[in-house]
Image: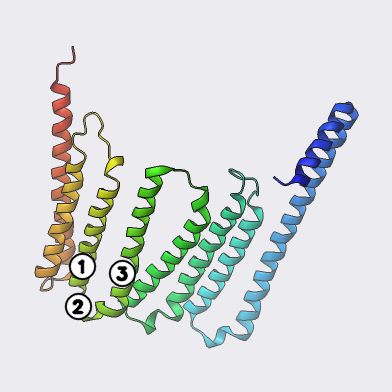
């Protein structure tokens, strides 16, 4: 808190000590300041939505005829989202959370609405100019940018010291590299392969990332009573992903999308059942122990 604020509070406390009349006066001053702030925010909200309505009217009258229905809807919706984000930043309390988090909340709000508005505008205006893989790359790239903006603004406020903070940094770096490589693959290389093989490579890369992340955070993977070895369920998950990789890379192409979806669901149920049987066996083993 600034020195001026401290001086204000000190002077108010001195006034409080003078007598009950001064207490009433201080409360009235605080109420007056709060009332003015609410009025300013209300006026800004009303003005913002009037500005949005004026923009939509002008757009519909002068420009909408040159675009299709979905493009015009995207313009109206994205502009409304932007105005809503600005209003959210205006109304968000500056003293929310620990000291110094008010501006971070505003950054999160504005970056989120900008990302959402970008996606809404991208779909009708630019999506058809690019392949499916490149559109997915754009989605991943914009999401990555959103994550970087928010993580850079919140990193100094995040708790954690020592080894935990180093593990978190290492895990985040691995995930970041995976996203960047995925974007590169989707933009430059994916068109050479059929979708089944691209899906298989995505599974394989994700499996590698999860294995590395498990190694990084192994010290934080604890055991609980009745759950047994936590690495066995993780291993079952990894085995399922490996089986899916083999299927989609070597065998999936001759089958239809529905048939491949059926294989995906069947394998998921199979491995989920294996995991359930293991966990149930662990609970039964604990229950059978003589605790007396």
User: Which image quadrant: the C terminus?
Assistant: top left
Residue highlighted by disc 1: 201
Which residue corresponds to the image point at 80% horizontal and 46% vertical from the top-left? 33
Q: In front: 100, or 116?
A: 100
Tell which residue pokes out farthest to the bottom in this image.
Answer: 66
User: Which image quadrant: the N terminus?
Assistant: top right
Q: CA distance from mark 1 to mark 2?
A: 10 Å
Mark toward the start of the polypeptide (3 vs 1):
3
Q: Nearer the viewer, mark 2 or mark 3?
A: 3
Which residue corresponds to the image point at 60% horizontal and 80% vertical from the top-left? 60
Report x, y in % for residue 186: 30, 74
Element type at marker 3? helix
Q: In front: 109, or 15?
A: 15
Q: Are marks 1 and 2 in contact (CB under 8 Å)?
A: yes
Residue highlighted by disc 2: 193
Disc on res. 226: none
Report x, y in % for residue 206: 25, 60
Disc on res. 181: 3
Which residue corresponds to the image point at 46% horizontal and 62% vertical from the top-left? 148
């Amino acid at each position: 808190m600034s020195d001026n604020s401290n001086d204000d509070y000190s002077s108010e406390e001195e006034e409080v000590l003078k007598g009950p009349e001064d207490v009433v006066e201080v409360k009235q001053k605080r109420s007056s300041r709060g009332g003015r702030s609410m009025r300013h925010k209300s006026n800004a909200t009303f003005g913002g939505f009037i500005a949005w309505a004026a923009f939509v009217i002008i757009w519909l009258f002068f420009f909408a005829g040159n675009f299709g229905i979905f493009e015009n809807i995207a313009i109206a919706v994205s502009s409304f989202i932007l105005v809503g984000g600005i209003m959210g930043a205006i109304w968000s309390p500056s003293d929310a959370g620990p000291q110094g988090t008010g501006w971070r909340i505003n950054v999160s709000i504005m970056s989120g609405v900008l990302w959402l508005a970008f996606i809404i505008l991208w779909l009708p205006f630019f999506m058809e100019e690019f392949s499916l893989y490149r559109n997915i790359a754009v989605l991943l790239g914009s999401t990555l940018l959103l994550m970087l903006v928010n993580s850079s603004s919140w990193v100094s406020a995040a708790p954690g010291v020592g080894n935990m903070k180093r593990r978190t940094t290492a895990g985040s770096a691995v995930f970041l590299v995976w996203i960047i490589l995925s974007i590169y693959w989707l933009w430059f290389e994916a068109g050479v392969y059929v979708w089944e093989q691209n899906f298989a490579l995505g599974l394989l890369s994700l499996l590698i990332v999860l294995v590395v992340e498990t190694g990084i955070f192994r010290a934080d993977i604890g055991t609980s009573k009745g759950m047994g070895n936590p690495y066995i369920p993780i291993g079952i998950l990894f085995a399922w992903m490996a089986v899916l990789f083999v299927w989609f890379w070597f065998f999936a192409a001759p089958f239809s999308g529905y048939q491949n979806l059926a294989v995906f669901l069947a394998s998921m149920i199979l491995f989920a059942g294996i995991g359930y049987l293991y966990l149930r066996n662990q609970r039964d083993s604990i229950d059978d122990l003589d605790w007396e």
